[in-house]
Image (cartoon, grey):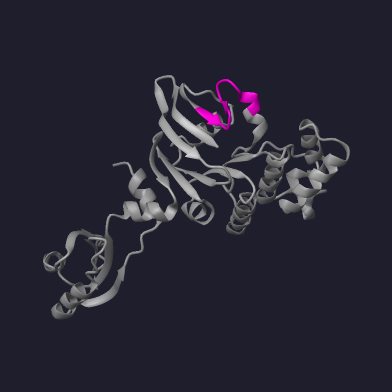
Amino acid sequence: MIEVQGLNKFYGDSQVLKELDFTINKGEILGLLGPNGAGKTTTMRILTCFLQPSSGNIQVKDYNVLDNPLEIKSMIGYLPESAPLYGEMLVYDYLAYVAAMRGLDGGSRVKRITELVELCGLKEVVYKAIHELSKGYKQRVGLAHAMMGDPEILVLDEPTSGLDPNQIVEIRQLIKDIGREKTVVFSTHILSEAEATCDRVVIINRGAIVADGATDRLVREFSGGAVVDVTLQHPDAQRVSTEFNQVAGVVDLEDLSEVDEGLVKMAIFSKEDEDIRPALYRVIREQGWDLLDFHRRTETLENVFAQLTREN
């Protein structure tokens, strides 16, 4: 449905997008992930025809952003990170104003507002002034605004930014509900949100795509092996390293100990299909070390994200 083709964007001599290529399928919830400044918002602004690319293009169905911006805008509902709301207006009056701009009138306007008030959970605040609302409710009003024209595609930039944990859960569920009927593209740097909500993620770092796929597939693809975390009390750290390095299947060690704590914390790496825990435990028992923690690390999207976007 949406095809991003060789997308580049320069601001002066600074290149903020570098040859982006990816496809968004109809009915998919796609998460654009990346650290601050990675290029997520710039990508969304080009997709919604608020910016033009320096080179490359985005095709939305039979239209592209260079030649058909009005047609694409009519298909998209866009919620920027800071929802552009008029605080002095009542929620209902604001939605009626948006409906009028979208060309809805009479019964169709009332019907659409009623549908969105129900869908976005605005019943309790529909006759309150927008400036009196919590940020969570303001985001809901922004979502209702973005969906007023019943767009095929919904583009949301950091939709849960600044919300408390309960509000995040509510907005996340709302996005999943909307995603049953529409194509949704949203940006975030909250990894748990992406894992819970998205069908697929595209990770961007420094303007370039570093990963693209379903979250579970990316975790398997980039984990690179199994990790066992061990914490021992008051052993000799050099002796621990020597003994663990002699265990069959160990490919690397990382000392995670904190200075002056009296503990030795080790991350022991092995091949993904090899369980080295029985052999490690035998060494610990034979050496008589006091064992405080011993577990195989569960790889997560957060670990993959850190691996792909860290500075070095």
Percent across and percent down for residue 93 are: 82, 40
Q: Is residue 78 above or below residue 274?
A: above
Q: Is residue 299 left or right of residue 162?
A: left
**Quick check: 184 left or right of 206?**
right
Q: Which residues are magenta?
A: 58-71
Residue, x 65% and y 27% (percent of image)?
71
215 horizontally vs 165: left or right: left
Q: Examine the structure image and report whether residue 26 is included in the region drawn in magenta.
A: no
Q: Which residue does the image show at 67% across and 36% down from the upper left?
A: 84
The residue lying toward the viewer, choosing from 49 and 192, is 49
The quadrant where residue 108 appears: top right
Q: Answer whether residue 66 is magenta in the image.
A: yes
For this view, does 50 lie left or right of residue 125? left
What residue do we see at 74% from left, 37% from top? 86
Farthest residue to the right: give it: 106
Q: Position of residue 171 (x, y in %)?
A: 62, 52
**Rendering coords of residue 225 (x, y %):** 27, 58
